């Protein structure tokens, strides 16, 4: 880089944008500048108006002004040479003085990309992994994610979750707002649930369009289970599935027959179905008819082999839905714990008492390999599978040692917690100590475990669990 040295009144210089937004000058630093002057000239360049703009050395320039220096040496270079160098050096200088926030790193990487540097160039110039730079640049492409990282001081990992969500569901402003309203440590847990909800809403929009194309009226009501009572409307409606034609009291009314009933409407409901081999919530059209039309029908007769009355069948179906919802809550909670475990495994140092945790978990359920998706991969090891577990484990222990033992512990803990209440309490305690934020569902599990262990009055145990949560916070 070529340039010239000039002596300029520091008050005539323009301070360019710095990666760090709050420049703090220590009194001893200003005093040193006052006594010894500027030993390392700041880098400056001519801006579009011809004025000299400081691109490197803002702190030295501000200290010279505060110290009352009449002139100071500056190193004048061309604008094209200065821009990238300024950001790279400022990132390094600010990181050494005081660790930058991820929001500030994001701003720096984004600016370098605007100057034409690739993710690989940025990574090499700043001593950062290419993956981390790519994560930052993916966030930079989504304004809502950039704003969230800055305002909520999110990590790049959390910002990437927001960016992916906003990109995938840009039209669902309500769910995006719900995700952004969450506390930083809740974003990773809430995102999978909201993503499923967004997918469900998209399905509901397709179902609505199909029904309206068929000439059917669609009720404008919340997307709930069919077993959740309808909100009060001007005209009462009942679910057609509970009724049959008098001539065929045990036969279900077909969709074609339902569409011909006077006053029939569609309520879009959430139910459970299998998509790509996975049991999950789906949106479906459910027929409802006015109460007056239902008087021309008869209550559907269920197969007598079930031994249930109509009321008992309705209660059975409602209980089935409740259990499916609980199963989904459990799945969401496990997904959040596994994601947290992956973060722990990727930290620079292992958490306190990790060996005690792993030993206890493996004492309950010892396996030779990690089988939960993501845990082994988090430390660069292939997951185990039947027939090759010993070879996988030997290789893993040789390459990753303690980290693989901790991964084995997490794997065993997830298999054990549903069967051993005392271990659930201990496991959740370790997670909280390592920085995990439990969900409401996990707090319910903790209370139930305390009840099972202590055999005490439920209210007393719940109070104790609440106190424990407060101490953890």
Image (spheres, rainbow, N blue to C red):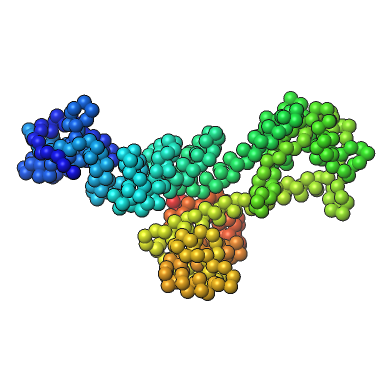
Whether 398 is drawn above or below 442: the answer is below
Residue depicted at x 19% and y 31%: 46
Whether 367 is drawn above or below 57: the answer is below
Asked whether residue 63 is in view, the answer is: no
Residue depicted at x 91% and y 41%: 248
Which residue occupies the foreground of this view, 413 or 146? 146
Could you tell me residue 471's position as x and y percent? 44, 54
Could you tell me residue 41's position as x and y percent? 13, 41
Asked whether residue 166 is in view, the answer is: yes
Give the left or right position of residue 289, taking residue 268 as reference.
right
Could you tell me residue 459's position as x and y percent? 59, 53
Which residue occupies the foreground of this view, 349 or 279? 279
**Screen quadrant of the N terminus:** top left
Residue depicted at x 54% and y 38%: 169
Which residue occupies the foreground of this view, 221 or 93? 93
Residue depicted at x 37% and y 62%: 349
Give the left or right position of residue 348, taking residue 300 as reference.
left
Could you tell me residue 327's position as x and y percent? 64, 53
Give the left or right position of residue 94, taking residue 438 as reference.
left
């Amino acid at each position: 880089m070529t340039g010239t040295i000039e002596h300029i009144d520091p008050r005539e210089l323009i301070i360019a944008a710095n990666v760090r937004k709050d420049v703090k000058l220590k009194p001893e630093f200003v005093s040193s500048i006052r006594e010894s002057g500027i030993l390392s000239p700041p880098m400056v360049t001519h801006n579009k108006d011809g004025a000299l703009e400081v691109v490197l050395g803002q702190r030295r320039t501000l200290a010279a002004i505060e110290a009352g220096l009449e002139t100071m040496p500056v190193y004048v270079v061309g604008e094209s040479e200065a821009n990238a160098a300024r950001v790279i050096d400022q990132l390094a200088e600010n990181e050494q003085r005081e660790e930058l926030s991820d929001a500030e790193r994001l701003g720096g990487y984004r600016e370098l990309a605007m100057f034409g540097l690739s993710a690989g160039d940025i990574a090499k110039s700043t001593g950062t992994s290419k993956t981390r730079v790519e994560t930052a640049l993916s966030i930079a492409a989504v304004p809502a994610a950039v704003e969230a990282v800055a305002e909520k001081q999110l990590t790049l990992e959390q910002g990437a979750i927001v960016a992916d969500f906003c990109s995938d569901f840009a039209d669902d402003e309500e769910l995006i707002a719900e995700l952004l309203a969450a506390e930083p440590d809740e974003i990773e847990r809430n995102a999978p649930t909201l993503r499923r909800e967004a997918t469900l809403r998209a399905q509901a929009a397709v179902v609505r369009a199909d029904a309206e194309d068929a000439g059917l009226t669609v009720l404008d009501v919340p997307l709930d289970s069919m077993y959740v009572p309808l909100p009060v409307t001007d005209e009462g409606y009942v679910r057609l599935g509970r009724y049959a034609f008098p001539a065929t009291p045990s036969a279900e009314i077909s969709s074609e027959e339902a569409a011909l009933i006077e006053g029939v409407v569609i309520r879009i409901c959430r139910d459970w179905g299998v998509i790509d081999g996975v049991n999950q919530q789906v949106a479906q059209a459910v027929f409802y008819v006015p109460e007056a039309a239902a008087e021309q029908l008869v209550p559907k007769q269920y197969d007598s082999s079930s031994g249930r009355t109509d009321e008992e069948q309705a209660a059975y179906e409602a209980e089935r839905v409740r259990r499916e919802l609980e199963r989904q809550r459990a799945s969401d909670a496990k997904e959040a714990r596994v994601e947290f475990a992956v973060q722990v495994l990727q930290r620079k140092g292992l958490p306190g008492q990790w060996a005690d945790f792993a030993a206890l978990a493996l004492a309950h359920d010892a396996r030779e390999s990690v089988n939960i998706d993501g845990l082994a991969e988090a430390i660069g090891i292939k997951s185990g599978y039947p027939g090759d577990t010993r070879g996988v484990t030997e290789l893993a222990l040789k390459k990753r040692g303690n980290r693989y033992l901790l991964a084995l512990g997490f794997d065993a803990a997830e298999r054990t917690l549903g069967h051993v209440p005392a271990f659930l309490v201990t496991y959740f305690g370790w997670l909280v100590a390592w920085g995990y934020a439990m969900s409401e569902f996990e707090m319910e599990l903790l209370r139930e475990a305390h009840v099972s262990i202590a055999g005490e009055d439920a209210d007393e145990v719940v109070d104790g669990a609440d106190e424990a949560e407060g101490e953890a916070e």
